[in-house]
Amino acid sequence: MKFSLQYITKKGRLGSISEIERLPLAAFDTPLMLFTTSGGTVPHLTHETLEMMTKKSLALQLPLASNLRALAATRESKFNIAEFIGMKESLTLCSVNDPLVPLPGGFNQKNSVAVWKKEGRESVNEVAYMDAMESLRPDLYQTLCDSETDAESTAKRLQRSVKSTAGFFEYCLERHKNSKVLEKSSILASLVGGFCSERRRQLTKEMASQPVDGFVIDGFNVAGAKGESAKVELVRELVKETIADLPEAKLRVLPGCWSPEALWDLVQEGVDVFDSSLPTAVAERGSALTFKFCPKTKSFSYNFEHGGENELKSYEISLKDKTYFERLEPILEGCECVACKNHTKAYIHHLMVTKELLGHVLLMLHNLHHYQLFFDKMREAIREDKEETAES
């Protein structure tokens, strides 16, 4: 895998992921959105319905927890995980945790990590983790890490997280170097330390010079709703400090269910890759993304049509609300997604109230389409910033 930086501005950096061993002709522009999957599929969508949204090659995030059942099958077959799930034209990145599932505290041990799936948790040590990577054979994967930390974690807990993650890294890197099965896969070093600047920089400085293809800035434990309500100013400062110690030319990944505003802030700090956990979480609660982002002004605008649901975020509307019972316009005027071109708010409201499966399908199609456009516009904003800087 080759990560190429085109240019860097005050509003972020534009780059491209290419020369993937399995996909030699594919290229993915950064900032990039990974499609978060569960069990190898994007939630609520079949491969056929996903193709209704885009014909482009996708970049998929494959959390280990939701792919544990596939290990035996991929191990015994000649297929890697992309081929096994029928998405062989897609880039695959395997993550330790699922950005939609908050991590309960107190289950990680010194030599193992609790991976959470629907049936409960499963403890995974570095040997089992690398066995899993050799079975799945993703295009990219992060090293095993203890990321079960947040703003409330004690100094002792943070030190243990950093020490365990450093130990996991040593084993993962050595195994990667000696693995013929993973010679076509790229390895990303995991960076943890919770919300403590000292612990984060301690580990980052150790990892910065390691022979890896990039870095995953982890350890904030901001899955699901915790990400949407995270203290963005503090996270942004910690990310900024972390990135200052990293080599400029390597890929930077930041998992988590970030709000659109937080994500744009983090792009400006130099993060390259995020996931689609936010549009999925919004669809899961029966809501649709409606915020707008202007590349020229680099600013957000909102539709404050919240019905009676005061707890909603500024970037969404709830189609469960009775306000939409007779509303015959699309979710968002001008949107070119399948849901907006063919259906009304009233119809989707009916689907949500009657608990029809199609309701979540349409919301997912809209939200993912809308979020992809957001990434397009952020890249445009960075290009605009470059041109404005050149003109001045």
Image (cartoon, rainbow, N blue to C red):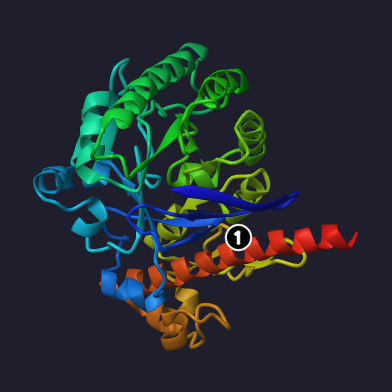
User: Please, which residue is most extreme toward the right here?
Assistant: 392
Q: Position of residue 157 (x, y in %)?
A: 44, 16
x and y, in percent, of residue 5 in the image: 61, 50
Tell me how many marks there are: 1
Query: Residue at horizontal 37%, vertical 34%?
Result: 103
**Vertical order, 62 against 23 (above or below):** above
- Kindly indicate the quadrant of the structure image that contains residue 344: bottom left
Does residue 353 sit above or below 82 in this rendering? Answer: below
Identify the residue at image location x=42%, y=71%: 56
Element carrying mark 1: loop
Q: Nearer the viewer, residue 23 or 35?
A: 23
**Image quadrant for the C terminus?**
bottom right
x, y percentage for residue 41?
27, 60
Q: Which residue is mark 1?
A: 314
Is disc 1 surrounded by few (<14), some (14 to 19) or many (20+) residues within 10 Å? some
Q: Nearer the viewer, residue 98 or 285?
A: 98
| Amino acid, disc 1 | Ser
Residue at x 51%, y 82% (from the top left corner): 336
> Does residue 336 appear in this view?
yes
Kindly indicate the quadrant of the structure image that contains residue 366.
Answer: bottom left
